[in-house]
Amino acid sequence: MAAWVQVAAGHFFLHCAQIYCAVRTSGRSTHWWRIGAFAALQTLALLLVTSFLPLMELRFLLLSLTHLVFFQWIFQTGMFPDALFAYLIPLSLQILGRALVLPFFAYHLLPIIPNTWAVRLLGPQTEYTAYLPSIILACFFLLTETRKGAERLPSYSPSHYFGWCLIFLAMAVSCHQTALVLRTVPNLDGTYLSLLGIRLIVFPILVFILHQFVQRERRNEKVLRYHVKRSSVQNAALRTLREERHDLLNELTLISTYVQMGKTEEALQAIAYSAAKLSDRHNYSTLPNDAWSTVLQVKQAEAERLGITFSLDLQSEAPQDFHEQRLLPKVIMNLVDNAFAAVEGRQDPLVHLSWSVDSQGRRQLSVSNNGPEISSLEGKRIFRGGVTSKADPSGNHGWGLVICQRIAEELGGTLTYTSSPELTTFTLTLPPATARKQQQISAT
């Protein structure tokens, strides 16, 4: 009984080492309870098969079948390529161990092999030396195990290629040894000849399987890259459409309000401004001469209609650069609209817009309001698309600050904010006008 337990423990340890090497080289997750469960089942199958089946060929066939079945069941994978790969890796390491390690022990360590401890360590006739490559490789993998070892490695990881190299090397060594025996030893039975024939058939089959596997993985990778790129393009297009929808709805709402109130002149000014933006969007260079003043007049009229005190402080001349003339009115529209929405319902709603130049020549467009304070948590989210404090199940709001931030980047400036219980201010800081001209000259 003790001898049976000792044999079972030895085979359990060897199966653990073998399947661990197979799992690591295949790039699968190294869950130790799965490795232990597989080793226990395969050890039990080995003991039962060797006890009841005398034919070596039948033992090999049944143990190969149990190996494949247990691996698929425990590791929840398919036959190809994972289960087949996990079966061939231990078999290849064992072939290399018998071909390389066993002769080394028999030639260099012959005096110590009959020793009792050597028999216990290496097994009778040093049968365990065939497992030394698996044990050495398992020790290497253990030493290089990382905290991310539970994650699946990429399909084309170096360890995966290393595993296939081991399989091909083992097949080549096995075919060479069989052919050498057939050539040097006369009067052999048909067993060696059949083994050589089987190996010569299996080797090209494995090459074909690897080729098909690599081709399939490459196709899958191309398809995946295509879908990822297509998804990113679709998301970008959807985001752009939402931004433009947000902008256009604001302008149409304002025009509709003026029409309903009978303010024809203001409605025509808003229409002219919207038409100029649409023309610019389609690469036309037409802009109303007073686009800057027009949008300010439109917002003053809207503030008067809403009962909001809207003050202006224009300390610098209007922008002269064409890109600023076409983009800054859009910033004003969005920042002022957000300010109007923030002070809605306040007892004394105040919104202030200033356009000034600091001591370093940088121009600043600031819009302040006495609405509720923006918390630090909200401040981290307000520049993300679709984030809004309004009830918006359609996703059409929350794009104004995103538009303003992109305009700031396009003009080489920055968009920042400060908020307190008394006042919230959004500030667009632009480089000096001379620096803007130099940027345009260098760009051209």
Image (spheres, rainbow, N blue to C red):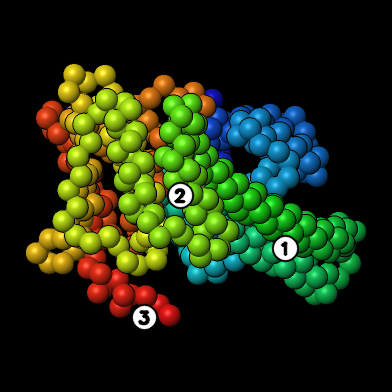
Query: Closer to the observer: label 2 or label 3?
Result: 2
Q: Name which residue type carries label 1.
A: Met
The secondary element bearing badge 2 is classed as helix
Q: Nearer the viewer, residue 202 or 236?
A: 236
Question: Which mark is first along the chain, 3 or 2?
Answer: 2
Disc on res. 273: 2
Disc on res. 442: 3
Gap between marks 1 and 2 measured at Cα: 77 Å
Q: Which residue is rendered at x = 55% and y = 43% of the image?
A: 241
Q: Name which residue type carries label 3.
A: Ser
Q: Which residue is mark 1?
A: 171
**240 on left or right of 89:** left
**Quadrant location, the C terminus:** bottom left
Q: Nearer the viewer, residue 221 or 381?
A: 381
Question: Which mark is first along the chain, 1 or 3?
Answer: 1
The secondary element bearing badge 1 is classed as helix
- In the figure, 431 relative to 237: above or below? below
The secondary element bearing badge 3 is classed as helix
Q: Which residue is rendered at x = 56% and y = 35% of the image?
A: 39
Q: Nearer the viewer, residue 340 or 167?
A: 340
Question: Which mark is first along the chain, 2 or 1?
Answer: 1
Q: Quadrant of residue 425?
A: top left
Gap between marks 3 and 1 measured at Cα: 65 Å
